Image (cartoon, helix red, strand yellow):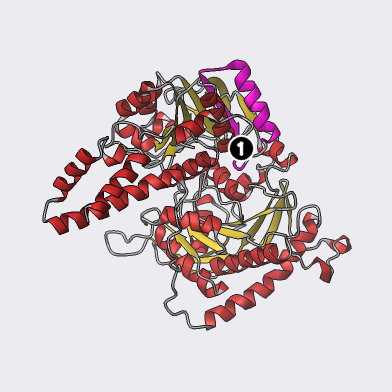
Amino acid sequence: MGSAARAEALSPQTTSRPLRAWQQSALRTYEEQSPKDFLVTATPGAGKTTFALTLAARLLARREIGRVVVVCPTDHLRMQWADAADAMGIILDPGLTNAVGPVRAGTQGYVTTYAQVAGKPMLHAARSTAVKSLVILDEVHHAGDGLSWGEAVEEAYSFAARRLCLTGTPFRTKPDERIPFVRYEEDTFEGDNGERGVGLVSRADYTYGYKEALADSVVRPVVFAAYTGTSRWRNSAGEVVAASLSDAGTKSVEMQAWRTALDPKGQWVPHVIAAMDDRITHLREEGGMPDAAGLILASDQDDARAYAKIVRRVTGKAAELILSDDPKASKKIERFATGSARIAVCVRMISEGVDVPRAAVLAWMTSYRTPLFFAQAVGRVVRSRATHESATVFLPAVRPLLSLAASMEEERNHVMPPPKTVQGDELDLEPLPPKEKDEEGLKQWEALEADARFAHVLHSGTAHTGEGSGPTVVVGEEDEEFLGIPGLLTPAQTAELLSKRDDELRLRIAASHRADDGDFMLVEDHPDEDDAGRSWRDAAELRREINRLVNRVAAKTAQPQAVVHTQLRQSVPGPPSASASVDILRARRERLRTML
């Protein structure tokens, strides 16, 4: 069945697996209202993509729309959306660029990014109005005027037939930074310094929070394991300063202790990586998750590379290093999501929207601390596949992060401000001491060393230290399932077990340091997966094959490649390859083969 015929044959019963209760409820609400604009706020991992594509399939089947346009934050999410749509019988092109005018024949639409829309808003306006379209704005908080994208999004999609906005957390904006197509109400808020102000808070048409998702077993329960330690550093005056992460005193000292703890040369990072690896082993062997994996979030690419080496040294296994400037980054994310590697190290590539269901452990080794980023990053490890699964987040025992962790399960509306920077993948960093030298060549800050110690388990906003718990905490050999499934062990028992493991991990780290570091390979090369049968990928592969065949024909006939391309389009009429359908591309490939 051709792609167009397949789209026409879609029905709500055949487009996806059984819908969750909240998705069915949200669809009923939408269809009762049949609105032009609709905002859904659903906690990360709840299934916003499935909801949006099910709605799109229904509208396509009823011919209420003829095209679907998805706008998302990153290039990798373009492919993730296209794959999800393809599984539901909707062919969306994730490779359409601003250099190509028309949408490729044989598709029901395309996936683009906010940055691309900002590059040529009128082009996207033409595409979304040429055919009656549903525009899905994924993680719509990225469309704020503060990111210089809001105006472009409004220009591109003001005349679209329907718009569906999705976000993982409600957000607050200033009166002059309204995000297009979002309904706002005035709201009073309290700032970090206690001052009160008035702003605008988004009001969703349908909301599904973490508390509800946890009760429905849609997301995993999260246990936060906080690690403290003593950090030592040299300040700009040449003085050596020492402070505890969890008792640093002033905010400035706390920030310097935090940065020192994250320094790859210290002991805090390898200690927490060992604890993380231990947790992954438990989940794989005892926790019913044989493919369990972990994510390490780093502040920058230099730290990420260093952390990957530490993973190799401590665990004996290569980490998947995923960096934004790596042309194979998306392939690596796909490989990690479906493969068997234990740990991936990244900066921001897996922070928002990226679906890695087997990831159940997160190590927070970054100085990012915005509420929005925290919620989105933790959301990467809470997507539930079975009721017995749980998630663990290892983090520094510093007040900004502990405050965010304590509020995860609060029954309240999490109101998050949009990122302030102008780049879509940039997030606010806590202002930490600079690494650079000043004009006289003296270092403003220099990390010396940092150790790590288990501090406490944070469960439902309450800290359990595992110390001085008295005779009520009984931990036998059968409870060696450290960090047991919440409900199987009490929070106090969980803390006791983590504390017990702490000394064992310290000996393990010391042994790894005695070993020869060497130059460890950070990642293993894997052969590219066969993309056959994945419809949107077929066109991309056909275009690459046509270019290779054109090169061979040009070399054989001593003609310029441009001449061969012209002859090919005369033989097989149609649009340029960039916007040609799969059928035309296949015909051109066969024609080129006859010319060799």
Q: Quadrant of the C terminus?
A: bottom left
The residue lying furthest to the front in this view is: 594
Q: Quadrant of residue 131?
A: top left
The residue lying furthest to the right in this view is: 471
Q: Amino acid at mark 1?
A: Ser
Magenta region includes residue 241: no
Residue 550's place in the image compared with 575, above or below, is below
Q: On the picture, is 522 further left or further right than 392? A: left
Q: Which residue is mark 1?
A: 16
Magenta region includes residue 26: yes
Q: Which secondary structure lies at badge 1?
A: loop
Q: How many numbered circles are shown?
A: 1
Question: Which residue is nearer to you in this view: 290 or 183?
Answer: 290
Q: Which residue does the image show at 49% across and 58% down from the upper left?
A: 335
Where does the image place residue 398, in percent across and percent down from the top left? Answer: 59, 53
Say if residue 262 shows up in the picture: yes
Residue 139's place in the image compared with 227, above or below, is above
Where does the image place residue 339, in percent across and percent down from the top left? Answer: 55, 60
Q: Which residue does the image show at 33% across and 32% down from the upper left?
A: 118
Where does the image place residue 536, in percent across and percent down from the top left? Answer: 42, 43
Give the extent of the magenta segment: 19-45
